[in-house]
Image (cartoon, helix red, strand yellow):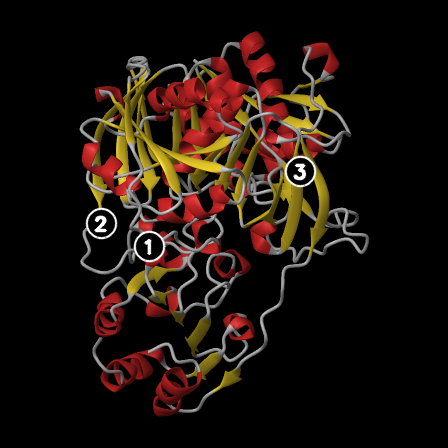
């Protein structure tokens, strides 16, 4: 049977993690379909059709889907689900919000944040902030799975799947969207950036994050933070890397003034190369770092910024 | 309006967990257990609603072995009024917990349910959304701010790009994110008082809920370890290593 990937999008393109979800989905079933639900989501549907490995795109147009309210999107997925063996979503804030609602309406379990597909019914997922890996098997007829995008290679573009228009299920009237306060940034998005520069409590103020911005801009890097830095109000919540924030796995992760609590390590320890800059040589971050420098970040970071070549 | 909060007993967040030698799970014997930190935030939010006169009674729900009474006592010491424990030694997965909670919600008729967005043991992030689905209620997940008035809840949510504001009809299920509030510590007099607050103990059967696990855990293993790295002395050395050894810049 086919696998349905439910794609989040901004109206123009589907999120980059949809390509990762398609890869995961192709390991679960014979054929991958992508659902793009939205209001005027035609462009986004086209971007989904261009992902290699996608056999069909379902474009569900309904004003109710404009802002991805779980109360309105879930009934659409529930209606389509019986045609599929699996429903797959990326484990981002959209997938985490909607997938469990779909699962409960179908009376099936959900596998959260799968990092590996062992078999169509068997998945590996991290528990305890990634300090243990559980292999779980589901006997449910329809399997609801959210996948951790960083653990699946993004499918290439260049495909041209047919797009089928399907009807909407309307608005249930339970919830309405008011607005968003999104962080504006020219930098690469944290979860897909090749390099991430991340700051912690050691930065001591939001003002000092400017120093990290300079380094990030020179490296073409995304900017992240530890929970401590977010809780202290230095940077907005969407910068948080960790167990309950974002999970990143860039080629290079530079942890600056971050001690390395297990909750933070959970979000970045799959990075290819990790650099730690910290004045405390006993800081746990050094246990996962490939390269560490013990010293004053206020000296080291400007020096590093000056030393690297602009990308 | 009654408010129901769910509190899960989990391994304390400061404990370094150990995978059992036979790979059947994680060692929980003789390990410090505490309330799931996100659930503490849920309890705190309910107490603040009561202090503002928006909540009349706070019911702390838990499900699991008899020791979950301690977790409920913690919620009672913080300020919840009474507890409900669905007692079982069987493994409970999110869908089963959501069904047990629905049965208690049907009985208690709260106007709002507040739960942690995820438990730090299984990291599922499912129960609140599942409960909302089963009840046919709206859901305000990953709440950063909550404002309840006139039969609606305005919820500021933590999402990938920043924050999002939604307005949902009550009754509703709220799941808490880290910045919603800072939970209080229970004072000694309140801990003493909590010992006298009632906890109702129910059996899953009595609620007519099938709690059989849907996911079979085949094995639990240690994650692969990272090779330990090196310390470099200078920025020049670091840049050289990143360029010529790691090849990442």
State whether residue B119 appears in this view.
Answer: yes
Label 3 is found on which chain of the structure? Answer: A
Identify the mark nearer the N-term, 3 or 2: 3
Q: Position of residue B31 (x, y in %)?
A: 73, 50
Question: Which residue: 18% across, 51% down?
Answer: A184
Label 2 is found on which chain of the structure? Answer: A
Q: Residues within 10 Å of mark 1 (few under 14, many from 20)?
A: many
Q: Which mark is residue A183?
A: 2
Q: Position of residue A216 (x, y in %)?
A: 26, 69
Secondary structure beneath dot 3 equals strand
Label 1 is found on which chain of the structure? Answer: A
Q: Are the residues at dot 1 and dot 3 in contact (C-beta closer than 8 Å)?
A: no
Q: Which mark is residue B199?
A: none
Q: Are the residues at dot 2 and dot 1 in contact (C-beta closer than 8 Å)?
A: yes
Q: Position of residue A11 (x, y in %)?
A: 20, 36
The answer to whether residue B80 is left or right of residue A272 is: right
Secondary structure beneath dot 2 equals loop
Is A210 drawn above or below residue B134 in the view shown? below
Foreground: disc 3 or disc 2: 3
Question: Which residue: 64% across, 53% down?
Answer: A132
| Closer-to-camera residue (A88/A34) | A34
Please give the residue where the numbered disc 1 appears in the rendered image.
Answer: A239
Is A78 drawn above or below residue A150 in the view shown? above
Identify the mark nearer the N-term, 1 or 3: 3
Q: Residues within 10 Å of mark 3 (few under 14, many from 20)?
A: many
The answer to whether residue A131 is left or right of residue A292 is: right
Mark 3 → mark 2, Cα distance in angstroms: 39 Å
Mark 2 → mark 1, Cα distance in angstroms: 9 Å
Identify the mark nearer the N-term, 2 or 1: 2
Secondary structure beneath dot 1 equals helix
Q: Residues within 10 Å of mark 2 (few under 14, many from 20)?
A: some
Please give the residue where the numbered disc 3 appears in the rendered image.
Answer: A137
């Amino acid at each position: 049977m086919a696998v349905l990937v439910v794609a989040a999008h901004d109206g123009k393109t589907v999120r980059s993690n949809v390509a990762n979800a398609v890869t995961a989905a192709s390991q679960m079933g014979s054929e991958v379909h992508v659902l793009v639900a939205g209001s005027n989501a035609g462009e986004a549907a086209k971007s989904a059709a261009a992902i290699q490995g996608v056999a069909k795109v379902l474009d569900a147009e309904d004003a109710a889907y404009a802002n991805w309210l779980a109360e309105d999107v879930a009934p659409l997925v529930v209606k389509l689900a019986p045609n599929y063996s699996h429903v797959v979503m990326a484990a981002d804030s959209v997938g985490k919000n909607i997938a469990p609602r779909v699962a409960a309406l179908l009376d099936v379990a959900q596998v959260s944040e799968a990092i590996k597909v062992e078999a169509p019914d068997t998945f590996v997922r991290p528990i305890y902030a990634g300090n243990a890996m559980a292999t779980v098997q589901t006997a449910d007829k329809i399997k609801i799975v959210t996948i951790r995008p960083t653990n699946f290679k993004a499918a290439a573009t260049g495909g041209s799947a047919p797009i089928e228009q399907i009807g909407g299920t309307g608005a249930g009237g339970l919830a309405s969207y008011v607005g968003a306060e999104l962080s504006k940034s020219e930098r690469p998005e944290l979860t897909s950036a090749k390099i991430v520069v991340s700051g912690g409590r050691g930065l001591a103020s939001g003002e000092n994050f400017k120093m990290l911005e300079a380094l990030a801009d020179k490296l073409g890097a995304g900017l992240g933070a530890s929970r401590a830095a977010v809780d202290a109000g230095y940077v907005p919540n969407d910068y948080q890397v960790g167990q309950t924030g974002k999970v990143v796995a860039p080629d290079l992760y530079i942890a600056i003034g971050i001690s390395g609590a297990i909750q933070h390590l959970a979000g970045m320890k799959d990075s290819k190369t990790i650099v730690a800059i910290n004045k405390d040589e006993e800081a746990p971050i050094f246990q996962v770092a490939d390269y560490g420098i013990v010293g004053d970040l206020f000296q080291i970071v400007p020096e590093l910024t000056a030393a690297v070549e602009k990308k | 309006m009654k408010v129901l909060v769910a509190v899960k007993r989990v391994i304390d967040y400061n404990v370094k967990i150990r995978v059992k030698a036979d790979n059947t799970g994680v060692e929980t014997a003789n390990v410090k257990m505490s309330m799931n930190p996100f659930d503490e935030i849920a309890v705190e939010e309910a107490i603040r609603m009561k202090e503002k006169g928006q909540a009349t009674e706070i019911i702390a729900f838990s499900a699991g072995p008899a020791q979950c009474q301690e977790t409920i006592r913690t919620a009672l010491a913080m300020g919840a009024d009474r507890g409900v424990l669905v007692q079982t030694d069987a493994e409970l997965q999110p869908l089963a917990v959501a069904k047990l909670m629905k049965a208690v919600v049907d009985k208690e008729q709260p106007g709002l349910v507040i739960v942690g967005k995820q438990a730090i043991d299984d990291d599922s992030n499912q129960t609140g959304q599942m409960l909302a689905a089963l009840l046919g209620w709206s859901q305000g997940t990953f709440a950063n701010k909550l404002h309840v008035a006139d039969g609606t809840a305005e919820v500021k949510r933590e999402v990938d790009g920043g924050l999002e504001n939604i307005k949902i009809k009550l009754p509703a299920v709220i799941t808490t994110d880290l910045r919603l509030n800072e939970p209080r510590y229970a004072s000694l007099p309140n801990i003493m008082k909590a010992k006298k607050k009632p906890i109702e103990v129910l059996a899953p059967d009595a609620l007519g809920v099938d709690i059989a696990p849907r996911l079979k855990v085949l094995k639990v293993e240690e994650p692969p370890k990272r090779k330990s790295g090196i310390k470099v002395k200078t920025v020049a050395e670091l840049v050289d290593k990143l360029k010529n050894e790691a090849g990442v810049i």
